[in-house]
Image (cartoon, rainbow, N blue to C red):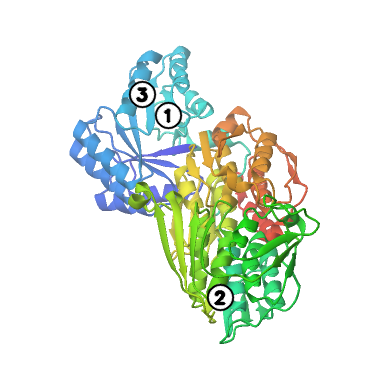
Amino acid sequence: MICVSIQNRNLEEIFSVLEEGGVEMAEIRLDRCPLSLDDIETLFSFTDVPLIATCRVGEGAISAQDAESRLVMAIRAGAAYVDVEIEAPAMMSKRVRREAHEYGTRLIRSYHDFSGTESTIALESIGQKCLHLGAEVVKIVTTAHSEADVQKVMALYDAFPKGSLVAFCMGEEGSGSRLECLRRGSPFTYASTAQGEQTASGQWPLESMRKALYGDFRLLDCQGEAPLRMPCSKSFAQRAIIAAALSDGTSHLRGYSPCGDNVSAINAAREIGADVVVEDDSLTITGIGTPTGPVPFTKDTLHVGESGFLTRMLIPVLSEISTGPVHLTGEKTLLRRPLSGARDIMKAFGVTLSCEGEEESEEAEVKVPLTISGKLTPGDAEISGKSGSQLVSGLLSALPLCDGDTVLTLTSPKSIPYLFITLDVLKNFSVRMANEMEGGEQFAQNQDWGLCDKMTFTIKGGQRYHPCDMVLEADWSSAAPFLVAGAIFGSVEVAGMDTKSLQADLSIMDILTEAGVSISEYEDGGVLHVQRAPLRGFEVDGSNCPDLFPIVAVLAAFCEGRSRISGVSRLATKESDRAGAILGMLSQMGVRSFIKGDALIVDGQSLSRRLLSGNLLRGGHFTTHHDHRMVMAILVASLGCREEVTLDDTQCVDKSFPLFLETFSRMKEGLAIRK
């Protein structure tokens, strides 16, 4: 990335530079710009461009006390980075470091030699000192008098972790190193706003640097474009549709958008006897509830489409409301996906699941089509959550309808956020239950869902679903590909997202932040702006958000360094063998990746490094494995491919986001060749 050094400008002039377009990152020389503390707060609070706050003490223009005040104000207002030279007073440095850590600002410790260039060994020692002083990014800048000086500095990139070093040379001899450093793995380099405004000798003007780096490569630019809108969350929609179908009155669900899985839920609701009217983005559902319970389901067959969640949710519900065995049928990828753990879990409640023509076996996993036999029996039961949360959500929906009470103990729970979505929807429809979470000492201290090893649900029987009016949230799973596209390739805005959502895939916000992305929320919390920033390798646990794996793997491919995404075991029973599909995609594109234990490891490179080294991703014809999440990920990755990308199946996106291709094309209209 190119960081523009801004000096000798007031607040209005700085905003003018930032708003011209094409400035993707900026260093604000607080020692050279006539800014008050109020100006600094305004500047660092009201821009989406990642900013570095720099205030040199060693140049003698400002006192250490004033420098500290300005840097601390910038940090508290939202600076992405703060740069403190290693010669700065120790107490000032410690206080700035503490503030940076508290506010999530990355600390740069910098060294400048305005007279020459020491040996590589000496410079490496200086870099290690910077790390000792708390640097997350080490900056080493010397003055080159020869090509040999440049090579001394460039050799440093072999000694520091990828993405943690910014090293180049000043002077005319070192001018080329300001671009070369990006090819070596520097997260950013510096340019001046224009010719004649250099902050150091040999610095390139922005336009020259931009042309050399990007050439005709097209970046995403959301300026002047209306924000993208996402479909409703099918996690909320499917649960709410079935809950409304079980209610004893008429419910209104607003914010609805159709997709394959949502349509399957509507069809299932109609099959069990509910009346469903679809009008624009609203559903009006009159349910089958009565004072004595839902009207019994008397049919012997029900079709669930391609929805794995709908299948698992309806198994317990149908076993409670049906008058006899029910045969569930499905289609497409659902027919080859095993319902892991379903047989044993339902057996604990007196229900038998069987498949046509199968040999009876306690170990065999059932698949659709299957037959549900037996009445759901309430009582105390302990089941394993290792196979996921979907069947548990079905039990939580069905057990309140039983005549007796239940205490359901869930060990090793997975996808806990989805269970909280279920509880939230049930609460809207007047169904209540108590929930307790248990874990070790770390869970008690941090209340981290990933550390929970047991959940207990106390469910009173004889409850009834009552109708409600409900707004369906926009879907974070659908938003994730567009947010990642903006993070890698420019900027994107997405409207209508709830940043306090219970959806597991809200985790994309944390993942993007961990990778270094700049994210802003504005217009009453309704619009998210994602702005490209220096991307670094990250470590995340994807166990609770398996739908994010494909697009997060693409993000990792463009992060400098190694990324580790744990939770691979959750991918085996998705629409494809998703772990294998991701590895195949990355390998075909030329990205080194492998699975170690339960983690996907990806060795990535920044977009700048790929452009300068001729290492953009490889295009070609890709198989999607008929997985909608793979389609989305491959198309986002295609923005960084050197050849055209074609897919064997794009229709499968209808399962969750029928307008994805149209929305993706609209986003691509924001591609612009920077002039």
Residue indicated by mark 1: 166
Which badge, 2 or 3, is on the more N-terminal residue? 3
Marks 3 and 1: CB-CB under 8 Å? no
Query: Where residue 1 sits: x, y (%)?
Result: 50, 37
* Mark 1 element type: strand
Q: Amino acid at mark 2?
A: Cys
Disc 1 residue crowd, few under 14, some 14–19, many 20+, Cα 10 Å: many
Query: Where residue 334 sits: x, y (%)?
Result: 72, 57
Q: Residue at x 70, y 66 (%)?
A: 372
Which quadrant is the C terminus positioned in? top right
Q: Which mark is residue 219?
A: none
Which badge, 1 or 2, is on the more N-terminal residue? 1
Quadrant in the picture for residue 252: bottom right
Above or below: residue 380 compared with residue 627: below
Residue indicated by mark 2: 402
Q: Could you give the CA–CA distance between mark 2 and mark 3, rounded to whole angstroms?
A: 67 Å
Q: Nearer the viewer, mark 1 or mark 2?
A: 2
Q: Could you give the CA–CA distance between mark 1 and mark 2, rounded to whole angstroms?
A: 64 Å
Query: Where residue 285 sits: x, y (%)?
Result: 62, 80
Q: Amino acid at mark 1?
A: Val
Marks 2 and 3: CB-CB under 8 Å? no
Q: Is any atom of residue 560 visible in this view?
A: no
Q: Is any atom of residue 493 visible in this view?
A: yes
Q: Residue at x 73, y 47 (%)?
A: 625
Q: Could you give the CA–CA distance between mark 3 and mark 1, rounded to whole angstroms?
A: 10 Å
Q: Residue at x 55, y 54 (%)?
A: 222
* Mark 3 element type: helix
Q: Amino acid at mark 3?
A: Gly
Q: Which mark is residue 127?
A: 3
Q: Is residue 464 left or right of residue 18?
A: right
